[in-house]
Image: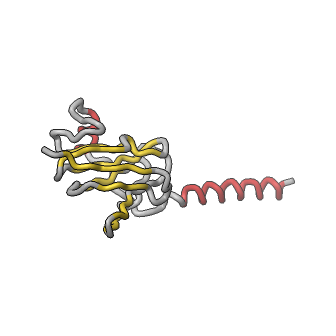
Amino acid sequence: MRTLYLISIGIVLGLGLAISGCNIDNEVGELDSDTHELLSTESATYGVGTKLGRDTIIINGMKFQPEHLSVYKGDTVVWINKGFVVHDVTVDSQGKSWSSDSIRPEKSWMKVIDEDFDYFCSIHPTMKGRVQILEK
């Protein structure tokens, strides 16, 4: 009986390590004070470029929110992972390819936008989004 108990504990611990191992990738910095300030101000908008020059996409519920974001050329977009698993931002179009570091839960990654692009999470390919540049 004790052997069965020890095997059960080993299985549970092993599964826990396997699940947490999915989150061990390149660590992205903590949410900075600018990001916290942006999220707490009314002038932060979702889906339309802001006068702040910084726009936010929340990763939650296995979705990029908003899925489509319009920004001005030179704006910075911050992706914030509010989910429970690691995600990334990956582009592969028109012969250009790049990917963010892994974005762990409660971490962020940012990029200055200089062109339109469609993107997806290479870890969860059904998650898709688009960033489009607005005309001034």
Residue found at x 60% / y 59%: 18
State the image coordinates of residue 14 (x, y, percent, origin top left). Answer: 66, 59
Residue found at x 20% / y 45%: 134
State the image coordinates of residue 106 (x, y, percent, origin top left). Answer: 40, 47
Residue extending farthest to the right is: 1
101 on left or right of 72: right
Residue found at x 71% / y 57%: 11
Residue extending farthest to the bottom is: 95
69 on left or right of 7: left
- Name the one closer to the observer, 76 or 135: 135
Marker count (numbered): 0
State the image coordinates of residue 70 (x, y, percent, origin top left). Answer: 26, 44
State the image coordinates of residue 136 (x, y, percent, origin top left). Answer: 12, 44
Identify the image quadrant of residue 82.
top left
Identify the image quadrant of residue 122.
bottom left
Identify the image quadrant of residue 115.
bottom left
Q: Is residue 11 above or below residue 60?
A: below
Scheme of colours in the image? secondary structure
15 on left or right of 76: right
Residue extending farthest to the left is: 136
Q: Is residue 133 above or below residue 3?
A: above
Residue found at x 38% / y 60%: 90
- Name the one closer to the observer, 19 or 13: 19
- Name the one closer to the observer, 53 or 11: 53
- Name the one closer to the observer, 124 or 87: 124
